[in-house]
């Protein structure tokens, strides 16, 4: 698989390590009433879709940036690559 | 029709005109007591034990393709019970005992061959870990034997013992482990279940569940609606996609695992050998091909095919272990979809929905578990209580922090 890095262009997926579903960006609030329940879902439950999947890849052998890659789990086709930091800021995070 | 040596001779003398199809191809009935989704090893074994062991009837197995076309026909055929943790070892030992009597039990030649599984160790720390594992196996009634380097060399002289980075210091041998003809497992269970009245319905994909007041009523399928009192899901890699139709999120990710077969060679490798410094396991099939595999690719996938970096990684591990493998040509390779659970151990449990039961999360170790998985799932479906060897395989172990994490890597499914 080739991941089209937003800054570095097309890079072999071997340069990256994989973390999983991009929802892992949205860490629950530890001080919430139902923090236990939220963290259970955050840590253990997954949507695991057959089709488009937004997922986190870390460019470990490159510029050490975290990327959100949109990839089809049925075909391995990658349709979109964004910086995870941009995705987080767009969702209202400070960093 | 019972299969036997006498039968073969009789058929040979009468022109082989008496053989019949090993199972029927029935039309789905409108309602069953038990519907098992997934006509793989686990699903067929569940139906078989429901009928044979628990005396149930009105059972159907629904398969979206053909039976045995999924992971039961895609694995590397190894059976063993060399686990460490209390939640796992009794279950896998139960499974190995069922393998030992399986062929007589379902009257089908599954070529169960207890040729031994040898796990190699390459460091002092690994020797300690394997000693502990061997003791855990003994405590649960399994066999295990710790070998030193000389004993391993006597058994398998062709390994690379002088590898500077990964010297072979010994091994943990389970002589009762071995290999089984995987397709024959599916066929044997299918035939055994069919003989006991189970309807095996192929080309029948479940497209949805019909529910009222939190109780499941039946399934929508590509061959129409089928009602059921109890529904069991045993669909391995498709677990996430199927259970999403019942609004269930699972502690599972689907990943692709590749497996490989070389050209046929003269008998070289007697049992199963695993490399302890990388992830590589190899055995030799009765046709002579070296059957081997290694790590999963490491990203979510439903594609049933992997990528080349993993091929390279597996072959490098093979070369480090036994350099002679480099002279063998690869005949074929393929991928299967693994239901990787969050702690690397399976789930056999009820769901939040009444009448809906789940069997999955087998990661890439589901084949060896087939008989016990079927037995324990049938036990749960028939009695609504878990089998004594499967009490730990609950959904709520993640909520309660009672993980069965053999590898100790936490909720990171691509590392198990």
Image (cartoon, rainbow, N blue to C red):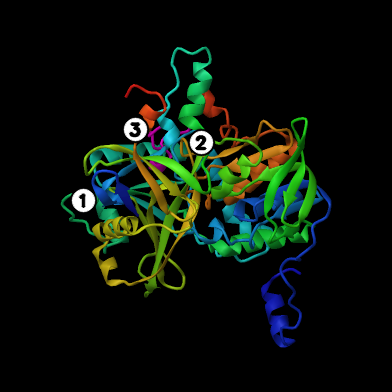
Same chain check for tags 3 and 2: yes
Question: Numbered disc 2: what chain?
Answer: A
In the image: residue B309, left or right of residue B67: left
Mark linked to residue A46 = 2
In the image: residue B111, left or right of residue B175: right
SS at mark 3? helix
> Do tag 1 and tag 2 residues touch (Cβ < 8 Å)?
no
Look at mark 3 in the image and give the residue it sits on.
A86
Query: Which residue is painted at 73% across and 81% down in the image?
Result: B10
Residue B151 sits in quarter: bottom left
Mark linked to residue B223 = none
Q: Are there few (<14), some (14-19), or many (20+) residues within 10 Å of tag 2?
A: many
In the image: residue B342, left or right of residue B47: left
Quarter of the picture holding the C terminus of chain B: top left
Image coords of residue B59 (percent x, y): 77, 51
Instruction: Write the start and end of the magenta stretch as one range.
Output: B402-416
SS at mark 2? loop
Image coords of residue B123 (percent x, y): 24, 43
Same chain check for tags 1 and 2: no
> Do tag 1 and tag 3 residues touch (Cβ < 8 Å)?
no
Does residue B284 show up?
yes
How far apart, in angstroms, are the residues tagged by discs 3 and 2? Answer: 23 Å
Foreground label between 1 and 3: 3
How far apart, in angstroms, are the residues tagged by discs 1 and 3? Answer: 47 Å
Q: Earlier in the sequence, mark 3 or mark 2?
A: 2
Query: Which residue is painted at 68% across and 51% down in the image?
Result: B206
Q: Are there few (<14), some (14-19), or many (20+) residues within 10 Å of tag 1?
A: some
Magenta span includes B2: no
Look at mark 1 in the image and give the residue it sits on.
B167
Q: Magenta stretch: dominant SS?
A: loop
């Amino acid at each position: 698989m080739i991941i089209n890095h937003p800054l570095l262009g097309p890079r072999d997926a071997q340069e990256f390590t994989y973390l999983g579903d991009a929802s892992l960006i949205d860490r629950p609030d530890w001080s919430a009433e139902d923090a236990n329940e939220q963290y259970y879902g955050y840590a253990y439950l997954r949507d695991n879709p057959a089709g488009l999947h937004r997922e986190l890849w870390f460019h470990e052998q490159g510029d050490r940036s975290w990327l959100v890659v949109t990839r089809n789990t049925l075909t391995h086709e990658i349709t979109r690559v964004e910086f995870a930091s941009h995705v987080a800021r767009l969702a209202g995070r400070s960093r | 029709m019972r299969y036997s040596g006498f039968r073969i001779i009789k058929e040979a003398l009468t022109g082989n005109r008496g053989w019949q199809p090993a199972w029927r191809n029935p039309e789905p009935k409108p309602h069953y007591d038990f519907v098992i989704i997934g006509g793989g090893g686990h699903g067929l074994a569940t139906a078989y034990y429901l009928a044979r062991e628990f005396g149930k009837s009105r059972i159907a197995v629904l398969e979206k393709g053909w039976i045995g076309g999924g992971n039961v026909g895609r694995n590397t055929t190894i059976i063993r019970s060399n686990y460490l943790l209390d939640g796992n070892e009794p279950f896998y030992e139960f499974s190995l005992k069922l393998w030992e009597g399986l062929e007589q039990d379902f009257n089908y030649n599954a070529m169960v061959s207890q040729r031994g599984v040898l796990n190699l160790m390459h460091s002092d720390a690994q020797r300690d870990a394997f000693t502990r594992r061997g003791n855990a196996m003994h405590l649960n009634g399994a066999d295990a034997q710790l070998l030193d380097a000389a004993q391993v060399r006597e058994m398998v002289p062709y390994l690379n013992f002088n590898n500077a980075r990964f010297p072979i210091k010994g091994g943990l041998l389970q002589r009762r482990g071995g290999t089984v003809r995987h397709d024959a497992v599916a066929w044997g269970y299918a035939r055994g279940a069919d003989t006991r009245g189970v309807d095996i319905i192929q080309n029948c994909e479940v497209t949805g569940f019909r529910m009222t007041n939190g109780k499941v009523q039946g399934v929508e399928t590509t061959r129409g609606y089928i009602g059921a009192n109890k529904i069991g899901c045993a669909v391995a890699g498709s677990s996430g996609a199927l259970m999403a139709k019942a609004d269930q999120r699972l502690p599972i990710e689907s990943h692709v695992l590749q497996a490989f077969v070389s050209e046929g060679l003269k008998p070289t490798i007697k049992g199963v050998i695993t490399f302890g410094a990388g992830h590589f396991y190899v055995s030799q099939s009765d046709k002579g091909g070296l059957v081997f595999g290694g790590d999963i690719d490491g990203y979510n996938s439903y594609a049933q095919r992997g990528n080349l970096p993993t091929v390279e990684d597996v072959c490098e591990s093979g070369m480090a272990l036994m350099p002679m493998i480099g002279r063998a040509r690869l005949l074929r390779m393929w991928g299967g979809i693994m239901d990787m659970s969050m702690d690397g151990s399976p789930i056999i449990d009820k769901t939040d929905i009444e009448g809906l039961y789940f069997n999955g999360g087998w990661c890439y170790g589901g084949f060896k578990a087939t008989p016990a998985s079927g037995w324990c799932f049938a036990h749960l479906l028939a009695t609504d209580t878990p089998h004594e060897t499967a009490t730990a395989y609950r959904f709520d172990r993640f909520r309660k922090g009672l993980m069965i994490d053999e590898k100790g890597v936490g909720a990171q499914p691509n590392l198990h």
